[in-house]
Amino acid sequence: MKKENKNLFIAGFILGLGLLGAIDGILFHQLLQWHHMILSPNLQLEIFTDGLFTALFSAKLIWGGVKIFQDARKNQLGDSWKIFLGSIFIGGGTFNLVEGIVDHHILQVHRVKPLAENPMLYDLAFLAIGLLLVIIGYMIKRMEKTT
């Protein structure tokens, strides 16, 4: 992969991580109020950890934007929308897979919907969506090679 396209892929991947983090935080933490980053009887701790989570995905969005700007200024940024869009999907799917495996299964700090009749079903669906996003992203990115 040419350096310009690699830079574009990395920037899109970082933006994908931040974007799915934002969707997770906005949808599951705030709008649906299914869970917080850490489930605890201490609401202040739950809100504080949600704030740290928001800061982390916001930093990723800023980092991705800054990377695009820096690479574009050096004329080292590819222009393939397929690589860019594919990398956003791959980054977003990676967010779901890592966050789901680490937080839901290894650390068990929260579940997607802990009060559901079958919370494991929601956790597995979260992982399946992550895998699907990675596959879609890979397919979009591969289209670049065939055109």
Image (cartoon, helix red, strand yellow):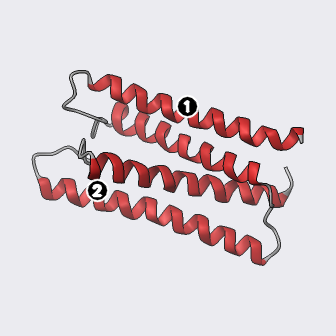
Quadrant occupied by the C terminus? top right
Q: Amino acid at mark 2?
A: Asp
- Left or right: residue 13 versus residue 147 is left
Pinpoint residue 125: horizontal percent, then vertical percent. Answer: 42, 27
Q: Nearer the viewer, residue 60 or 19?
A: 19
In this view, which residue lies farthest toward the right?
A: 147
Marks 2 and 1, how far apart at CA: 24 Å
Q: Residue at x 34, y 34 (%)?
A: 104
Q: Which residue is mark 1?
A: 131
- Circle 1 residues within 10 Å: few <14, some 14–19, many ≥20: some
In this view, which residue lies farthest toward the bottom?
A: 73
Where, by quadrant of the figure, is residue 75 drawn?
A: bottom right
Q: Say if mark 2 contacts mark 1, CB within 8 Å.
A: no
Where, by quadrant of the figure, is residue 71 drawn?
A: bottom right
* 27, above or below 75, in the image: above
Q: Amino acid at mark 1?
A: Leu
Pinpoint residue 19: horizontal percent, then vertical percent. Answer: 50, 54
- Left or right: residue 133 versus residue 124 is right
Q: Residue at x 52, y 63 (%)?
A: 61
Q: Which residue is mark 2?
A: 50
Judged from the image, the secondary structure of the residue bearing numbered disc 2 is helix
- Circle 2 residues within 10 Å: few <14, some 14–19, many ≥20: some
In this view, which residue lies farthest toward the left?
A: 41
Whichever of labels 2 and 1 marks the residue nearer the N terminus, that label is 2
- Left or right: residue 127 versus residue 53 is right
